[in-house]
Image (cartoon, helix red, strand yellow):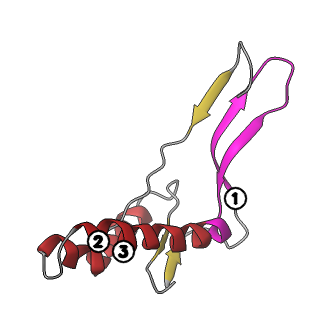
Amino acid sequence: WGGPGGYVYQKAYLEFFCSPDKLNALVEKCKELPSLTYMAVNKDGDSISNVESNDVNAVTWGVFPAKEIIQPTVVDPVSFMVWKDEAFDIWTKGWACLFQEGDASRQILDE
């Protein structure tokens, strides 16, 4: 997306679902590593984060000859909350429907 002779950089970045207990353990660990940032939200919109509401985090960017830095992927709290709705819809209306009611996998997805 930037032409020949350039470089694309990407930060380590994870998106995943986990239980509240696992989230609490991760948040505690992140306190020991202040260079790590995180945003977490549950289906109801309750969130926890160590970034400010107007912070923007570039996840990928490119450097190409005779061009300004290109930043195609950023993560910020506002877009994260929009992503939340889409992610939980896919999780509950897409994946969960693959399992019958009462199935252990369906229960995990529903909870």
Question: Cβ–Cβ below 8 Å for labels 1 and 3?
Answer: no
Q: Secondary structure at mark 3?
A: helix
Instruction: Specify whether 30 is left or right of 105.
Output: right
Between the C-alphas of marks 1 and 3, the distance is 28 Å
Amino acid on which the number 2 mark rests in the picture: Cys
Q: Quadrant of residue 22?
A: bottom left
| Res. 97 mark | 2
Q: Which residues are magenta?
A: 56-79
Between the C-alphas of marks 3 and 2, the distance is 7 Å
Residue nearer the viewer, 11 or 106: 106
Amino acid on which the number 1 mark rests in the picture: Val
Q: Is residue 70 magenta?
A: yes
Residue under pointer 1: 56
Instruction: Specify whether 40 is left or right of 92.
Output: right
Q: Secondary structure at mark 2?
A: helix
Residue under pointer 3: 92
